[in-house]
Amino acid sequence: MDFDFETVPHHWINRLGFLIRRELQTRFRRAGADVTAEEWAVLLLLWRRDGRSPGMLADRTIRDRTTMTRLLDGMERKGLVLRQTDADDRRRMQVWLTTSGREIRDVLLPVARDLIGQTMDGIPQQDVETSLRVLRRMTGNLQPNGG
């Protein structure tokens, strides 16, 4: 019995994810920004709300805590974030954007929007909405709480 992986959406999701990460990093570099796709995911969350815990960032980006620690180490070395002790609970850390981390948004967002536009070219809005609904459902099916 043969398994035709090209007929399974998961194959295309994985392939698209790989291509997007690679292209995003290439375009960021071309724009003069030393930011990886993984760092981009953290920046997106911090731009929405600064001062998040490393654990929350790990959960939201689907990374283990050790990987997140290493990622934040690199982002600190690049001057994008700072980790500080939580004022209410000294056992906890919070991650804060630096001025550079906030300002790089103006460089990265147009690059990401351009890539998104390229990938969405020629796709009707109805297809986009259907795809989002299906992908959210598939994601929910894999999460312990159902989404």
Image (cartoon, rainbow, N blue to C red):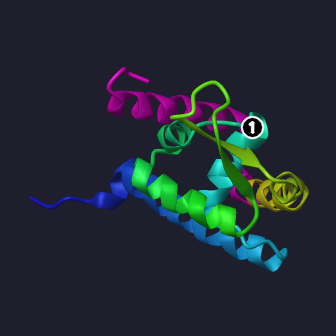
Where does residue 23 sit, x and y in percent of width and height? 66, 70
**Classed neighbour count for the residue bearing mark 1: other residues with Cα under 10 Å, few (<14), some (14–19), many (≥20):** some
Question: Secondary structure of the magenta portion, mostly?
Answer: helix
Q: Using the image as rendered, state which of residue 8 and residue 92 is in the foreground.
A: 92
- Residue occupying image coordinates x 53% and y 45%: 61
- Residue occupying image coordinates x 83% and y 76%: 32
For the magenta stretch, what is the residue range? 118-147
Q: Using the image as rendered, state which of residue 47 and residue 37 is in the foreground.
A: 47
Where does residue 54 sit, x and y in percent of width and height? 55, 43
- Residue occupying image coordinates x 67% and y 62%: 76
- Residue farthest to the top, as pictured: 145
Q: Using the image as rendered, state which of residue 114 and residue 78 is in the foreground.
A: 78
56 sits to left or right of 33: left
119 sits to left or right of 137: right
- Residue occupying image coordinates x 79% and y 71%: 33
Residue 3 location, quadrant: bottom left
> Under tag 1, what secondary structure?
loop
Total number of numbered discs in the rendering: 1
The residue at which mark 1 appears reads as 50
Q: Which amino acid does label 1 sit on?
A: Asp
Where does residue 59 sit, x and y in percent of width and height? 48, 38
Residue 49: in magenta span: no
Name the quarter where the N terminus is drawn: bottom left
**Is residue 85 positioned above or below 36 on the image?**
above
142 sits to left or right of 84: left
Residue 99 location, quadrant: bottom right
- Residue farthest to the left, as pictured: 1
**Is residue 112 positioned above or below 45 on the image?**
below
